[in-house]
Image (cartoon, rainbow, N blue to C red):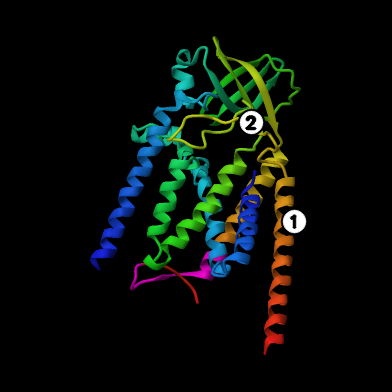
Amino acid sequence: MPDLMAHVLLAYSVGMILSWRYQWVDSRYLTVMMVGALVPDLAKADILLDSDLLGYAIGIAFDWFALHTLGGVLLSILIGCLLVVRTERKRVFLLLSIGASSHLLTDALLITPSGLAYPIFWPIAYNQPPSAGLYLSTDVWPAVVAGLLAIAVTAISRMRDEDTEVIEFNHD
Amino acid sequence: MRVASLLRIFLIVVLLVAQFGLLVFFESSSSRFEAGVYPPIDSMKNNYQEYYGKNVNVAGSVIHTDPIIISYGYSPENSVELRIAGVDERVHLGDSVRVYGRVESDYTIDGKRLIKVSRTGQFYMYSISLLAGFWVLGRVIRDWKFDIKSVGFKPER
């Protein structure tokens, strides 16, 4: 997926579908999944703080893109879990992981000049899997598709909620 | 402050240090990536010969169309001009492009593929991404609060 809105809408949709099976996934936890979808793009800090310039200034070369790989995402999620109270950590870890994973996987479908995706599993592996080359990060249509999916899933959720209310009414 | 909270803060600091370690490690191991990386601009300017024969990704604005020359870098003060050979794409002055190719002598990239990125597309991408960020931030403020006693975020009832 290209832009952040597409990532967030996809995470929202996945979360809504999960809520059909797991009732504890309410709006608050949906938010956590959407935050997870943002996590890999912490690497975009490069836009504000150029790693080349900053690395030169502090005398240590580094690359923000590590935050967009398995290793960087995992550490970011662990930090996120430590920011919440103990009773919420398992759920937050799970939901942040699902949200972040959806981002990593859909970014591996981007069109790239080399035809290969980024090293998604780093530091475990240095491989760059072939990219499906479906879209550019500047394309509009992925966000449109994700938006339509979110609308459809929301509508289905509402219908399911109404059905549940009818069943409960009939039981009374 | 309770011991558990202090321990948590300590762990967060450890993880942040580990995170920075990963950023440094990623940069140092970038030569092991198959499809090349975006070389640091300073390195391209001052140690260009290190990249001879290597496949790299570069990106920048087109400053000359025939031959194609791009300015690789984020700012005029910190950029290097690279000639892109071997691609058939038609480009215009000011186009943003991404190129994958092999580094040849004399600041030339033997391009295997060139992708143009439209300015409208970039504007859209940054705008919609900012909107998404604000949307999620709004939801976090609405749904989660920081509990001083527990020193952590918890969901709003």
Q: Residue placed farthest to the bottom in the image?
A: A172
Mark closest to the chain's N terminus, 1 or 2: 2
Q: Position of residue A59 (x, y in %)?
A: 34, 32
- The CA distance from mark 1 to mark 2 is 26 Å
Residue visible at 35% across and 48% down in the picture: B16
Q: Which mark is residue A148?
A: 1
In the image, residue A64 above or below residue B97: below
Q: Chain of mark 1?
A: A
Name the residue type under label 1.
Leu
Residue B95 in view: no
Q: Position of residue B24 (x, y in %)?
A: 38, 34
Task: Say few, some or many: other residues with alpha carbon within 10 Å of mark 2 (under 14 / 14 to 19 / 20 or more).
Answer: many
Magenta span includes B143: yes
Tell me which segment is drawn in magenta: B138-151
Q: Position of residue B93 (x, y in %)?
A: 71, 26
- Disc 2 designates what residue? A112
Q: Nearer the viewer, residue A90 or B140?
A: A90
